[in-house]
């Protein structure tokens, strides 16, 4: 009985280690900040923030738009993000078309 409990505990520990190892894997590389704008997006009198980041590893150079809203305590919290809002650049060095530019943001 003791051996079966020991095996069960060992299996659960190994299973937990496997789950945490996979969840820490970073799938995207949005490491280059292209643009950041601050302003009151939701008319609450507090400064919010919009950022555009580029994935420099992916050959198509996709963008991520992140919208941060101010909380009552003054801290910014990520409200929503999208990887599909701005079309990828497909840079010239990868035989792509770079005619589309990132739009300006204003509030």
Image (tube, rainbow, N blue to C red):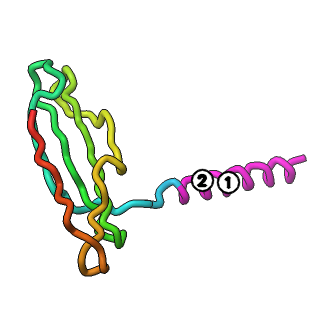
**Apparent side of residue 83 relative to residue 11 in the rendered image (left or right):** left
Q: In this view, does 55 lie above or below 75?
A: below
Q: Residue visible at 30% across and 51% down? A: 64
Q: Is residue 74 above or below residue 88?
A: above
* Residue 61 in the image, given as x and y percentages of width and height: 30, 66
Q: Are marks 1 and 2 in contact (CB under 8 Å)?
A: yes
Which residue is the site of mark 1? 15
Q: In this view, does 79 lie above or below 25?
A: above
What's the magenta region?
A: 1-22
Is residue 12 within the magenta segment?
A: yes
Q: Residue visible at 26% across and 34% down? A: 77
Q: Residue 48 carries which label?
A: none
Measured in 3D between alpha carbons, the distance from the residue under mark 1 to the one under mark 2, in whole angstroms, is 6 Å
- Predominant SS along the magenta part: helix
Is residue 10 within the magenta segment?
A: yes
Looking at the rendered image, the quarter that the C terminus falls into is top left
Which residue is the site of mark 2? 19
Number of numbered discs overlaid on the protein picture: 2
Q: Disc 2 on helix, strand or loop?
A: helix
* Residue 100 in the image, given as x and y percentages of width and height: 20, 60
* Residue 72 in the image, given as x and y percentages of width and height: 19, 20
Crowd around label 1: few <14 · some 14–19 · many ≥20 (10 Å): few
């Amino acid at each position: 009985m003791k051996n079966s409990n020991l095996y069960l505990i060992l299996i659960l520990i190994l299973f937990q280690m496997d789950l945490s190892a996979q969840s820490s894997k970073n799938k995207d590389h949005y490491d280059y900040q292209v643009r950041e704008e601050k302003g009151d997006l939701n008319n609450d009198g507090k400064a919010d923030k919009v950022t555009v980041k580029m994935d420099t590893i992916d050959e198509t150079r996709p963008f991520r738009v992140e919208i941060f809203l101010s909380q009552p305590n003054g801290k910014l919290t990520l409200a929503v993000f999208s990887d599909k809002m701005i079309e990828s650049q497909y840079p010239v060095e990868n035989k792509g078309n770079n005619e589309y530019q990132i739009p300006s943001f204003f509030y």
